[in-house]
Amino acid sequence: MSAKSAPVLPAATGVAEAAAVLRSGGLVAFPTETVYGLGANALDARAAARIFEAKARPSFDPLITHLADVTDLTALVGALPPTVAALAERFWPGPLTLIVDRPPTVPPIVTSGLDTMAVRVPDHPVARELIRQAGVPVAAPSANRFGMLSPTRAEHVVAGLGDAVDLIVDGGPTRCGIESTIVDARGGQPVVLRLGSLPVEALVEAIGPVSVRPGSSGQPVAPGTLAAHYAPRTPLRVVTAPVPARPDDGTRGYLALRDAPEGAYGAVEVLSPDGDLTGAAARLFDALHRLDATGVTEIVAERVPDTGLGRAINDRLRRAAATWQTSG
């Protein structure tokens, strides 16, 4: 964590200044409906390079480019495959990222050298107005250090990036709390490359069968698909059922879906007392940030029902646990 922090401006008054920062090649953290993004001009290779530097992100992990409106996509990339166009029309603005062919105007650093590009239109008025006023597409991964917990509040950005960013726009807590779903629908059966805030069931209802292929151990074909990712600083372990505390569990933290566990854990977070998975997803990263800040020695996290947004929650928990299995 940096000893200093970038200026934090309220969304109501900070958008114009943030847009000017983007146009000048700077970095702006801003809210979307999913998580806070770390944005730069997607047409400026030097600005995009600053994202990788600020996040300590490996150059092989591509970025998502954000647009203000659905019509901006064809203006940027030209004609679209039919299923891509149908998904954009159905789910944008919204937490869906689509894979398209990279146009020559977007520098290869944004796509980590791939001939494809990840792109979406966020469903957040501040994000869309910022992009409109900037007048350029905005490359924006999550506004955190690479591999760490994604930020769902401006204070998470401050704690994680400090003054590595030029300006932070505070739009309050994000609505979805988990990153966008990424789909490659350019040909054949659409493939879900990353589970996210748009449930697979909604995709199936709209376009028919899809395949799911999240996770990568090598060169990612889409952002946020590495097998180990989204991790707190505290070691995390996933359990399949509630685990009562042992006498020595006062130093451990616990992440529950709906009921606090029996016994005395050092810290407990309940994602959704009524078991609602949408609410649980919205609170996931915020709860993990709080547990991470308590100084517990381990976080025990309950796996949730693997349906709807539960699949994305379990995906994030699995990747977070894999980070510690890999490093330990």
Image: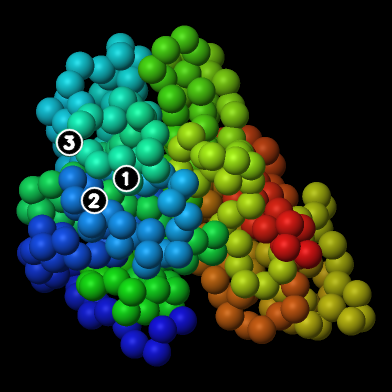
The residue sitting at 37% across, 79% down in the picture is 162
In the drawing, what numbered circle is on residue 110?
A: 1
Dot placed on the residue nearer the N-terminal end, 1 or 3: 3
| Mark 1 to mark 2 CA distance (whole Å) | 7 Å
Q: Is residue 322 left or right of residue 99?
A: right
Q: Who's the residue at 31% across and 25% down the image?
A: 101
Q: Tell me the amino acid under the disc marked 3.
A: Thr
Mark pair 1, 3: CA separation: 11 Å
Q: Nearer the viewer, residue 277 or 26?
A: 26
Residue at image coords 20%, 26%: 77
Amino acid of disc 1: Val
Disc 2 secondary structure class: helix
Question: For the C terminus, which image quadrant?
Answer: bottom right
Label 2: few (<14), some (14–19) or many (≥20) C-alpha neighbours in 10 Å: some
Q: Secondary structure at mark 1?
A: helix
Specify few, some or many for label 3: CA neighbours under 10 Å numbering under 14, 14-19, or 20 or more: few
Name the kind of residue labelled 2 in the image: Ala
Residue 296 position in % (x across, y down): 71, 80
Q: Are marks 1 and 2 in contact (CB under 8 Å)?
A: yes
Q: Is residue 250 above or below residue 113?
A: below
Q: Does residue 113 show up?
A: yes
Which of disc 2 and disc 3 is earlier in sequence?
2
- Name the secondary structure under disc 3: loop
Q: Is residue 9 left or right of residue 110?
A: left
Q: Which residue is mark 3?
A: 105
Of callouts 1 and 2, the N-terminal one: 2
C-beta proximity under 8 Å, tags 1 and 3: no
Q: Which mark is residue 45?
A: 2
Whether residue 73 is visible here, answered yes or no, is no
Q: Position of residue 60 (x, y in %)?
A: 47, 46
The x and y percentages for residue 43 are 18, 45
Q: Residue at x 11, y 62 (%)?
A: 24
